[in-house]
Amino acid sequence: MNMEQHLAARLNHIAPFHVMELMKMAAELETDGRHLIHMGIGEPDFTAPPPVLEAAAKALTDGRLQYTSALGLPALRAAISDHYAQQFGVTVPASRIIVTAGASAALLLACAALVDVGKEVLMPDPCYPCNRHFVVAFEGKPKLIASGPEHRFQLSDDMVREHWGAHTGGVLLASPSNPTGTSIAQSELAKIIASVRERQGFTIVDEIYQGLTYDGKPSTALSLDDDVVVINSFSKYFNMTGWRLGWLVVPERIVPAVEKLAQNLFICPSAIAQHAALACFAPETLAIYEARKAAFQRRRDYIVPALRELGFNIPVTPDGAFYVYADCSHLTKDADAFAKQVLREAGVVIVPGQDFGPATAQSYVRLSYANSLENLQEAVVRLKQFLHDQG
């Protein structure tokens, strides 16, 4: 019997991650000796700073590698709680914080706990593709709502009210967002949360880029409502992508349900990563992160006007994360083909909009500035020559 006959039907609703296919193409070119400048994957070029590495080494030496609680190390949960108080002035009890195996695990747990079979979850188009696939994995129905530059590529309260139906269960937002680098204003987010609460739904807010906010002070949805569910990560601001560590904040009443799920699905997050992450919150480590954040901002302030000068239309200046979402519709009718041509001919890795939703699939590309300023400058030189050659 053909093994494909045993695959679950839900797989038909989960699309391939096209960014990864482009990365395979890039890897093949590099194997052939091509020098590429990577502006594709959203991964900081900075790695974990010395205090974090030292904490990891000490955990190894001391043999602190056993299973932890499914909720995470008590000391780490307390440190995250203190971080919310010190950085955002928000009281978030450690008892509401669940340490997870990356933000992906946090989103899986949130969807497992909240998404009923057949229930719709509203989210903006464009958005991070895995978010809608997490919903599908638990047999919910992601409902993408076209959210253009006039809305900063985010959902508004009016959109939520307009699209909420009898089968809607909640909303899944990201602020700042991947792929757009834009945030939802706190005033608008407060309205959305209130509207969802009024309809007895759930609000999940992905805040994994929260620490990388440049135009104003970073904020959190947790300051608006105790019922909101928030996802965060050690990958982006804390530069620990491969360590696979994140956290989830949930209302107190559903902690036991999420703990039960975490026990069964993950046992616990990585012990060594948790011990290392304790060092993230030391004053000297936070100073390193803030210096790196300033470097990201300098890169943004260079690359956005440089791309505009090349002819890319960037209708919304990103205020966070490390992405530029650029309209290339006057340069090409097919963003996917354009990205592949830029890769082959200019040696610059960018990604097309097709992963992020149908509304911008053919007309936008995403560029990551999680690379050195020198490399970004070289990328601009290469793109300028490429566009000149195209006539």
Image (cartoon, rainbow, N blue to C red):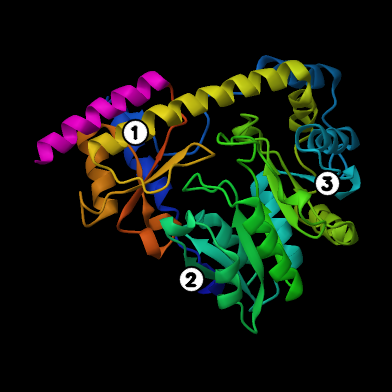
Q: Is residue 163 left or right of residue 254?
A: left
Say which mark, if any, is on residue 97.
3
**Callout 1: 10 Å neighbours few (<14), some, many (20+)?**
some
- Does the residue at mark 1 contact the one at mark 2 (Cβ under 8 Å)? no
- Which residue lies under the disc numbered 2? 12
Q: Residue at x 60, y 36 (%)?
A: 216
Quadrant including the C terminus: top left
Query: Could you say which is closer to the camera, residue 79 or residue 213?
Result: 213
| Viewer-nearest of discs 1 and 2 | 1
- Does the residue at mark 3 contact the one at mark 2 (Cβ under 8 Å)? no
Instruction: Give the mark nearer the N terminus: 3 vs 1.
Output: 3
Tell me the quarter of the picture where residue 212 sits: top right
**Helix, strand or loop for disc 3:** strand
| Viewer-nearest of discs 3 and 2 | 3
Q: Main secondary structure of the magenta part?
A: helix
Q: Residue at x 51, y 27 (%)?
A: 296
Say which mark, if any, is on residue 305.
1
Instruction: Give the mark nearer the N terminus: 1 vs 2.
Output: 2
Q: Residue at x 68, y 18 (%)?
A: 287
Mark 2: amino acid: Asn
**Helix, strand or loop for disc 1:** helix
Mark 1: amino acid: Pro
Residue 13 lies, with reference to residue 68, above or below; the image says below
Tell me which segment is drawn in magenta. Answer: 373-391
